Amino acid sequence: MNFSRIFVMASNVFQEVIRDRILYIIGFYTLILAAAMRILPEIAATTEGKIFLDFGMALMGVIGLIVSVFVGTGLINKEIEKRTVLVLIAKPISRSEFITGKYFGLSAVLAVLITMMTVIYLGFLQIAHISHGIASILIAVLFLFLQISLINAVAISFGSFTSSLLAVILTFAVYLMGNISQDLLKFGRLSSNPGIERLTQALYLILPDLSRLDLKNEAVYGLQALPSPTALIANAGYGLLYSSMLLAIAILIFSRREF
């Protein structure tokens, strides 16, 4: 792989997506938080602080997920439908560089988006004088980015061989199943049926365990301490490794496609 060509591809994706969507999304996030800050004290009595903490983080995750799924699944199909993929792969750029550049370009967009939303979120917490652990929130946001980046890899993988609509549906399905994969494993162990237990174990091995990258409850509610540094590193490594495997699969599939 030529990293300079990957960088150029990633830069093009970054500029295109930033120009089209980011400012509107940031404005939407700000307006929703402002509305929540105004409404929550009237309906939540003494718990508005915790609810706002939870709501701000949850909304950040939802927005990141929507951008990752809808933009990620369309990155490749859009090039195919416009036939620009023929021009791109005719140039001295390999298909692996094409896929990798698309992934890193959208990941950079997600990094900027989540960073800006975090700054706005922390600003609202300061304005409202809501007590919070900034270190825990920043760690949770970092892991949110890893989770959304993994979904980005899922979206690009599905987008490399199916239609945009089907890729969106499959990516959302993986996200939902990935968030309950540990519960599926527990359900299989509680079941008295060996077939169900084997099925749930297989699903757990195949699906990403997204709960390992979800630290929102620990950061917001403080019901339990954040994982140890060793566990955090292991979970981050899991997310990065899983994303790398998905990209490798996407590259393999895309390399075999005929245009």
Image (cartoon, rainbow, N blue to C red):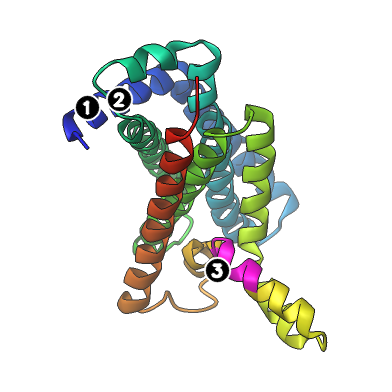
- What residue do we see at 63% from left, 52% from top? 174
Q: CA distance from mark 3 to mark 1?
A: 44 Å
Q: In the orientation shown, which residue stands out farthest toward the right? A: 192
Q: From this view, report whether residue 154 is shown above or below residue 132.
A: above
Q: Secondary structure at mark 3?
A: loop
- Tag 2: amino acid: Met
Quick one: label 1, few (<14), some, or many (20+) residues within 10 Å?
some
Quadrant position of residue 114: top left
Which residue is identified by label 3?
A: 221
Q: CA distance from mark 3 to mark 2?
A: 41 Å
Which residue is identified by label 2?
A: 9
Which of the numbered marks, if any, corresponds to residue 5? 1
- What residue do we see at 50% from left, 24% from top? 258
Residue 196 lies within the magenta run: no
Q: From the image, give the main secondary structure of the stretch colored magenta.
A: helix
Residue 205 lies within the magenta run: yes
Q: From this view, report whether residue 31 is shown above or below residue 186.
A: above
Relative horizontal placement of residue 13, taking residue 121 as reference (left or right): left
Quick one: label 2, few (<14), some, or many (20+) residues within 10 Å?
many
Q: Are the two marked residues, 1 and 2, in contact with CB atoms closer than 8 angstroms?
A: yes
Mark nearer the viewer, 3 or 1: 1
Task: Give the magenta-colored segment's residue range.
Answer: 202-209
Q: Are the two marked residues, 3 and 2, in contact with CB atoms closer than 8 angstroms?
A: no
Q: Earlier in the sequence, mark 3 or mark 1?
A: 1
- Tag 3: amino acid: Tyr
Q: Nearer the viewer, residue 66 or 120?
A: 66
The answer, for residue 126, to whether it is visible in the render is no
Percent x, y of residue 167: 63, 36
Percent x, y of residue 160: 52, 34
